[in-house]
Amino acid sequence: MNFPVAEIPVSAPLDRTLVGAFLENVPDFVYFKDRDSRFIALSASMVHLFGQQDVAAIIGRTDFDFFDEAHARPAFEDEQAIIRTGEPMLGKLEKETWPDGHVTWVLTSKMPLRDVHGEVVGTFGISKDVTQTKAMEAALDKSRRELVDASRMAGMAEVATGVLHNVGNVLNSLNVSSSLIATGLHQSKAESLAKLGTLLREHAGDLGRFLSEDPKGRRVPEFIESLATHFLAERARLLQEIQSLQQNVDHIKEIVAMQQAYATTVGLVEPLDAAILMDDSLSMNSGALVRHDVRVVRDFQPVPPISAERGKVLQILVNLIRNAKYACDEGGGSDKLITLRIAPGAPGRVQLFVQDNGIGIPAENLAKVFTHGFTTRATGHGFGVHSSACAAKEMKGSLTVLSDGPGHGATFIVDLPAAEAASL
């Protein structure tokens, strides 16, 4: 292919062989334009890009002859700005829209073309095709978003699992209460009262003599007193179990209502009371904590409201409290203790602490704790803590962990912006 370069308005003679070899073989798109942004020379790669066989078919034409207006117009304006100011344009990512609708991406640098007197007589530039790189970046970004979404869903699944686990514990208590009520009813002496009624009816004609002279009749008052004592005790016991049953039903309703309330605030950032959030997450774990004999200490200092999403904070705290319970179980100590603390952080920040006296974390694992899929529990999947860290980051916060090693427990710290600071 023959590349004319005589039209390039420069005063110093160019080695036409070297310039021709360069334009023939350079893989990137190289082009020279006059003051009207018309092509005066270009590389073979660009001739092929335009679908032409000869460079002569392009000389004198502009981007408007090959590209869609969406790309041609900004490119023209960039070149005219370079001609007016003499300032180059370096490393600009450009989206090229072609007449048939397909899109390519190039990384472009354009510079002023000057004559022997230093006057700007046009522009020249080089564009590198980065379409595949952009496609890879888009695919990676999509994968990252899908991974974040999957982690978030896994984290919310942890919340749902914690809720169901706690409801299951309450249902166990309901079953115990209902079984005791059923047993009490089956063991009731109501049949004995019916037999007494039959006996008295049989002696209705001589009831006075029967009660005063008959050996069986003389025992009737004692028997009635015994029945009264039994029925009073049974009534008290059944009322106690019914009260317990009602409390457990109310607890389940509270848990479900709480979960529904948090589910309806997805994506809403608002001022929130840290103590209420901590208590709600504790309530959702309370059944499991009681069943595993885990003692909870609350240390809530006065702090301003936090600026966050209810559902995400709940997700984080439910996961952390649940993990703390597991850590206490695995630690094997008799005094299982979880301390929930709220305290001011750095200016404009609030910190929520979940501390346990459980198994602890080895130093080599501290850096891995928040890695997706990392877990030391045989039945764990490593989503909960990772998704919690992601949720904290999405709320302009952070999740960190401290531990002095095996047997010394662990402290997870959720750092979130205060509502007053977030509004500034």
Image (cartoon, rainbow, N blue to C red):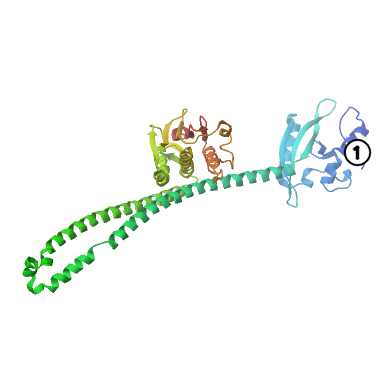
Q: Nearer the viewer, residue 294 or 320?
A: 294
Single out the residue that lies furthest toward the top: 117
Q: Is residue 401 left or right of residue 33?
A: left
In the rendered image, is residue 170 in sight?
yes
Quadrant of the image occupied by residue 72: top right
Q: Is residue 56 left or right of residue 313?
A: right
What residue is at 19 percent from the left and 65 percent from the top?
193
Q: Nearer the viewer, residue 253 or 41?
A: 253
Q: Would you call the spot at circle 1 few (<14 residues within 10 Å), some (14-19), or many (20 or more)?
A: some
Q: Nearer the viewer, residue 41 or 60?
A: 41
What residue is at 30 percent from the left and 54 percent from the top?
241
What residue is at 23 percent from the left and 63 percent from the top?
189
Residue 213 at x, y = what percent?
Answer: 7, 67
Residue 165 at x, y = what percent?
Answer: 45, 50
Quadrant of the image occupied by residue 4: top right
Q: Please, what secondary structure does the residue beneath circle 1 have? A: loop
Quarter of the N terminus within the rendering? top right
The amino acid type of the residue labelled 1 equals Pro
Q: Is residue 319 left or right of residue 135?
A: left
- Circle 1 residue: 4
Residue 299 at x, y = what percent?
Answer: 38, 33
